[in-house]
Image (tube, rainbow, N blue to C red):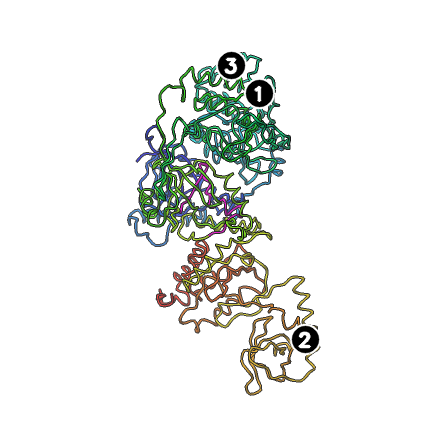
Amino acid sequence: MSYVVYAVENADRMILMGPTVADQPTFKAIALSYIQAPKLARRTATGDFTPEEPYAYEAAELIRSTFIGKQVRFVEDYYIEALQRSAGRIMGANNQEATGMLLKEGLATLPDRMPPRIEKELYEIYSLMSASARAARKGIFSGEGAKHVRHMKSYSPDELAKKIEGIKGQQLLTRVEKVVSPTVLIISVKEMGDTQFPAHLTGITTKDNGDESLNAEAKFFIERLLQNRNVKVHYDGLDGFNNVMISIMSPKCSFQEELLSKGYVKVQNATLPLSTRIDEITSAEAAAKKQRAGCWKHYVEPVEASPAEATGGENDSPPPPLDGEAPAAPKMVGLPTTLPDGTPGPSYTGPTEFVGTLVQVVHGDTVVIRDDATGQLLRVSLAGVRSSKNIDRDQDGNSPETRVTYNDYAWEAKEFLRSRYVGSKVVAFVEYARVMPETKEIRPAATVQVKHTGINIGVALLEAGYATFFLSRYDKHSKASELAAAEDGAKAEMKGVHRGTPAPPMKVLELNHLGETRSRYYLSFLQRGMQGNRPPPLKGVVDLVLGPSSLRVYIPKENFQIPVKVAGIMTPSAAFHPNEKADPFAQEAKDFAIDLIQQRSVTIQVFTSDRAGNFISCVTLEDGTNMSVALVAEGFATVMNADRLPFAQQLMDAECAARAAKKHIWSANGAVPQRAVKMEQERAAANPHALTRVLDETSEFVHYMITEVADDGLSVYLQGYDAEQDHKKGQIQDLINRTVAGEGYTPKKGERVIAQYSGDKTWCRATVLKAPRDDKAVVQFIDFGNTETVPVKNIRAVPRGPEYAVVRETPAFAKLARLAYLKSPEQGDALAGAAYAAVEEYSEGEVLAKAVYRDSLGNVYYTLTTNESVPSLSETLLQRGLALLDHRAAAVDAEDYRRHEAAQEIARKGHRNLWQYGDIDEGDAD
């Protein structure tokens, strides 16, 4: 089938654009089958880059320069479930075949053994290509891989600003790596080194275009022309927020003019002065207005406004703060209210002017704004605006199903505001306040304007015909004439509520407390079209954030509103009862979720349902942000029950980064959610053979000395070292040296004593492992881990005085570390000596170690390495065939496990030690 190469993500991974369906483009994520190309660096959830593999850039550049924007034929060979991609081969003009091109240039590898799904003839052709590249020492076979690696760096805002100042005013050849929105691109340029950074197009904005589909069309237009292309960019400088501002140039005009002429964007006065083409940009917008193009299709030429103000005279509000200005502190003054009977009510003492973010639309005339100055959520009525609240709720007794009917454009009004303004920075000017009869709440009524554009959202709602203009005789409004004119315009065009005919009702089925049985009934609807283990993606809107990972999501396709639990994570819990204590950062986590996702359009994939009837789902925002990963990356969640999720590794990476940065629950003031700890304990108890990830501070790499190697070679003793520990060691040794002049001592089993090590005649702390026999006792030197049979004459009791409490009570300085991902082979005794020698050879003593998991008996398993960029000790033993891989560890860390699996494969193919007679039967050992 014919496609166009839309984006090149890696040399062997692309996005293809297919034929349009219902005037919408279709896309297909593909991977080149049977080969492995080196991986480009990618940006992680923390903003840093993963390491890039040698020749990854050259490989991707070969594919990009050959195929981007070109028509190709794609032949699908199979589907990769883990990547959720089709695998196959692409052929371009002149019989250019991507797989063959990469193999010929030595920029990809082919499996040594023929994959089961490939035709023998094709495999032989590919093998010859790869062998030819290897013989010619091309690409990754050149032996010069280190010279062909980009070391990607992420600059801080201040560093980036300083570097941009160095190229300001220059026109440079620049790569467009990704299109974030119609006005924001991710770019890279040679003069900035190995990095990628966001840049804004100077002088234009998409704010308040009034049509999300238009923004999507504009983004597609830019991607089709610019993504993965080299373009000429003029670096205009920085705006007031230190955003990088650029202009994309062509011989005829700037790309901003192209976008403006099609009505995809509007002029942004705040950054326009930075442009070198101010007149051309403003002319392009003027032409689009004249032609009613794009966002200007309903544009009406402005008329001279009357200076008279209705109802309340002149009470002009100050203009909203300009872009780049810090929000002013809220003004706290009293504002009178009037009760329905005309008597004075309690005064409103909240802020009368504030800047914030609109986070929720409650009704068509009521919104919730998070005040930037205080962080509080403020419920605000739109002054002078009244929308329908004719909403019927029909519930049959205690049924979990509630049928909600929205009449008289109540749904349309709410959706109009939600789809355009949620997430926008707004300025609120309180005009008056009212006492709500039902709740006695003193609620401010305000003029709410979008900060960057000055659009009055109340006026916009009236112009659309989804509300009416209303002021009581006690209300005064500075913008009354604007509101009245907006309503008159809607009446003249017979829009919305002014049509004279009833609006079609909108019916939504709200599902609550479904329980296990009923939820499975609805699960069948939500998983229709499931392919294998991949639930179908469903478009939805997060109607409400109940908790950091608990949402209510509306699914337009089914007209359901369902309870959703975000998959793969556990978040801090709030206190539901007075005698309960909330988990640390529970409120902060919920606030983060509200700001991130509340009332935003999302895509969900429903994996299953729990006993309470919540649907366990992957929730993804329109910009690709995975909510589970975002919460974990910010330190507001820990990974839980994520083993089978397609994004499990992203969660693990995000958690490691959050722990390293000590964010929120991983900080000194934080704690892992109590429910997560309890669930891990219950899971360990239910499955004695299961392994549990270590989540505490020991899961970070720390420097140790190997003081002893166990006889099987698969365990070592580690001794930490720092100034405090060294001081305590010296203190203990001084006390020990005072006791050695005494007589021998006959100890009991398990007793802590002082014993002399025969190797260097040093007296050390020890624990008696076997009671004395023939005047000798078996002891373990607890600060080093080694065991020895010591004559009773060389053993001393620890004195009982308080001075020696430090000798008796200080924990052992050496701790047993079992090597992670390993298990002993059945014929382990024969190879124990070789494993022991390999451990001693691996390091002269100093290593980095971190706890990875523990078993049901409490044994802790560690990863040991001399450097994070080299194979670990466990990998080394596996590569030499001196140990076997513990398959139980696959669920702990999938990526780490695969790396150890590859190490064992080296030993198996090379018939080393355990594998010298071919494959061995591991079934019984598992």
Q: Quadrant of residue 510?
A: top left
In the visual, does 274 lie left or right of 145?
right
Q: Tell me: residue 215, above or below residue 297.
A: below
Q: Name the residue tied to disc 3.
A: 302
In the visual, does 347 lie left or right of 385?
right
Q: CA distance from mark 3 to mark 1?
A: 20 Å
Q: CA distance from mark 2 to mark 3?
A: 93 Å
Secondary structure beneath dot 1 equals: loop
Quadrant occupied by the C terminus: bottom left
Residue nearest the observer in this picture, 44 or 512 = 512
Q: Residue at x 60, y 68 (%)?
A: 811
Q: Tell me: residue 226, above or below residue 786.
A: above
Other-residue count near label 3 (Cα within 10 Å), few / some / many at <14 / 14–19 / ≥20: few
Quadrant occupied by the N terminus: top left
Q: CA distance from mark 1 to mark 2?
A: 86 Å
Q: What type is the residue that disc 1 sits on?
A: Ser
Residue 494 position within the rendered picture, expressed as x and y whole percent measured from the top left: 40, 17
Mark 2 vs 3, N-terminal side: 3
Return the mark for residue 383.
none
Secondary structure beneath dot 3 equals: loop
Tags 3 and 1 touching, CB below 8 Å: no
Q: Name the residue tied to disc 2.
A: 736
Q: Name the residue tied to disc 1.
A: 478
Give the residues in magenta: 615-639
Asked if residue 215 lies in the magenta stretch, the reply is no
Residue nearest the observer in this picture, 474 or 843 = 474
Q: Would you say residue 98 is visible in this rendering?
A: no
Q: Quadrant of residue 787?
A: bottom right
**Name of the residue lying farthest toward the bottom:** 774
Q: What type is the residue that disc 3 sits on?
A: Pro
Other-residue count near label 1 (Cα within 10 Å), few / some / many at <14 / 14–19 / ≥20: many
Mark 3 vs 1, N-terminal side: 3
